[in-house]
Image (cartoon, helix red, strand yellow):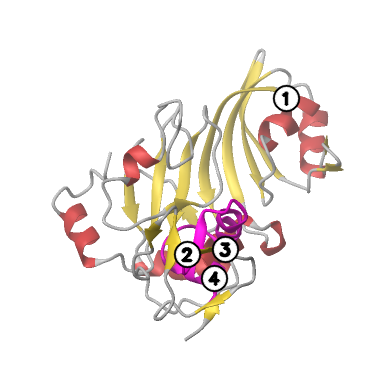
Amino acid sequence: MRERLQKILAKAGLGSRRRAETLIRQGRVTVDGQPARLGQTVDPGTEDVRLDGRPLGPAQARATYVFHKPKNVITTLSDPQQRPCLGDYLSRLPVRLFPVGRLDNDATGLLILTNDGLLAQRLIHPRYGVDKTYRVKVRGRADGAALTALAQGVPIGERPSAPAGVKLIKSWPGGALLSLTIHEGRHHQIKRMCSQVGLQVEELTRVRVGPLRLGGLKVGQMRPLKPNELKRLKQAAGLRDESGGSPPRSARAKLDKNPGSGLS
């Protein structure tokens, strides 16, 4: 059965369809020995599809995990400078996952990992309005004017930020702890928003994405989503839950051997 090549790459666990398009543009994907083209349709049963010269594996069962990203871990699967990165944690899993969006190197908190390209696309795209909440420690004067400006939107780049949910958790002379809820994912967005109102971010932790909360998950640990969590996450992204969301049996067995400890 012929399918668009981007969809086949996503099913093989190589990332979202957008990332698949990037791989094709980079010339890393071939079909029967020829460079692949964007929009190309392929029958994986009769045509040889390869990435970097290696055959694609079979389509993977869909799996979605939540990870508590530590500070100073790069949100990439590898790093040419040999810095700690997400791939150091994911290499222990029997499925190939990729991060949904990014967290800054010095940020911590909730990061969703999946091989469901459509779910990832929906969670990232601001059109679908999936909220992300951050706990933000700032230096500076977090007065009413600053908080109102953050809530209404401030200039960052070519357009202002969208209205945000802003809550002052506590304050002290020269600083404050804020809760900021946004549905965009622009580069360094929280830091840039705060900078526009005279606040410097000192610590940044993502504590919620849609219905998912960081809860008691310890730094460096991950776990598969429970079926009801995946269902609610898909509903938040405007998708129907068609799979039940359980991770592959081998992944569950590996976690069950070390309950509560994740894969740190």
- Callout 1 environment at 10 Å: few (<14), some (14 to 19), or many (20+)? many
Query: Can you tell which mark lies on residue 5?
Result: 4
Q: Position of residue 104 (x, y in %)?
A: 56, 33
In the current view of this chain or complex, which residue is farthest to the front?
33
Question: Which mark is in front, 4 or 2?
Answer: 2
Residue holding disc 2: 33
Given the image, on which type of amino acid does mark 3 rest?
Arg
In the figure, residue 69 lies in which quadrant? top left
Q: Position of residue 172 (x, y in %)?
A: 62, 17
Q: What is the count of numbered marks?
A: 4
Q: CA distance from mark 3 to mark 1?
A: 40 Å
Left or right relative to 218: residue 7:
right
Q: Could you tell which of marks 4 and 2 lies nearer the N-terminus?
A: 4
Left or right relative to 7: residue 223:
left
Given the image, on which type of amino acid does mark 4 rest?
Leu
Q: Could you tell which of marks 3 and 1 lies nearer the N-terminus?
A: 3
Marks 1,2: beta carbons within 8 A? no
Magenta-colored stretch includes residue 57: no
The residue nearer to you, when weighing 204 against 29, is 29
In the figure, residue 188 lies in which quadrant? top right
Identify the element where label 1 is drawn: loop
Left or right relative to 8: residue 41:
right
Residue holding disc 1: 142
Q: Could you tell which of marks 2 and 3 lies nearer the N-terminus?
A: 3
Identify the element where label 3 is drawn: helix
Question: Which mark is in front, 3 or 4?
Answer: 4
